[in-house]
Image (cartoon, grey):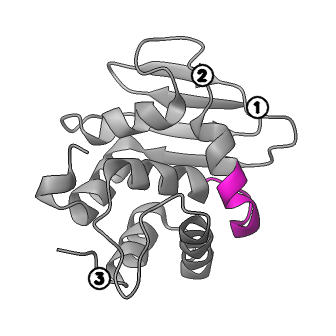
Amino acid sequence: MRVHTDLLPDTLVSETRLPRPFINQTIRQMKAAGRISAGRPFAPPLTARDIARLVLALSAASPGTAVNHERDVGRLAISEGAGPPAVEAAIVSLINAPPTSGQIAIASSFVEIRSPELAAFGSLPAGANTFFVIPIAAVQAIARTLLTKENQHV
């Protein structure tokens, strides 16, 4: 089963409350850069890593900076707390975890993933100009909507 063309942006708009044009442009940038699953006429099924990368890309200040921003933020090493060694891996683990409370906050000077089991911090590269907060429950709702059963643990 493949994600319908409108289901991906509809779900992201619903859960993030970001404008649809911003989301559509960010998705196009991420696909063009090979950062998320893409294909013609249909993209292959999304993975948890694709969802994590999209969440990180949506935290960029603009769609034009989304790919580099996603790469930079996703690679940040965890400096405090427990969990996976990098931000992208931490979000993937939250997607695959049982429902939990907490939030992911990305600002110009830090990344914080706060949940009952995990506190992770890192510093963004100089020049990052963003502020984005998304509840972990919203990330998990995006994943539940977009991931097929066979891809939920990829």
Q: Residue at x 41, y 55 (%)?
A: 50
Image coords of residue 101 (percent x, y): 31, 35
Secondary element under disc 3, as helix, strand or loop, is: loop
19 or 36, nearer to the observer: 36
Image coords of residue 33 (percent x, y): 61, 64
Q: Residue at x 37, y 88 (%)?
A: 41
Would you name the residue on which mark 3 appears?
A: 4
Closer to the eye: label 3 or 1: 3
- The image shows residue 137, relative to residue 11, as above or below, that is above
Report the side of 126 relative to 85 (left or right).
Answer: right
**Which comes before the other along the chain, label 3 or label 1?**
3
- Quarter of the image with the C terminus in it: top left
Image coords of residue 55 (percent x, y): 50, 53
Residue lying farthest bottom? Answer: 41
- Label 2 amino acid? Ala
| Main secondary structure along the magenta-highlighted residues | helix
**Which comes before the other along the chain, label 2 or label 1?**
2
What separation in Å lies between label 2 and label 1 (alpha carbons)? 14 Å
150 or 131, nearer to the observer: 150
Q: Which mark is residue 146?
A: none
Secondary element under disc 1, as helix, strand or loop, is: loop
- Label 3 amino acid? His
Would you name the residue on which mark 1 appears?
A: 109
Image coords of residue 35 (percent x, y): 53, 57
Would you name the residue on which mark 2 appears?
A: 77
- Quarter of the image with the N terminus in it: bottom left
Q: Is residue 67 magenta?
A: yes
Provide the residue span drawn in magenta: 59-68
Report the side of 48 relative to 105 (left or right).
Answer: left
Residue 153 placement: quadrant: top left
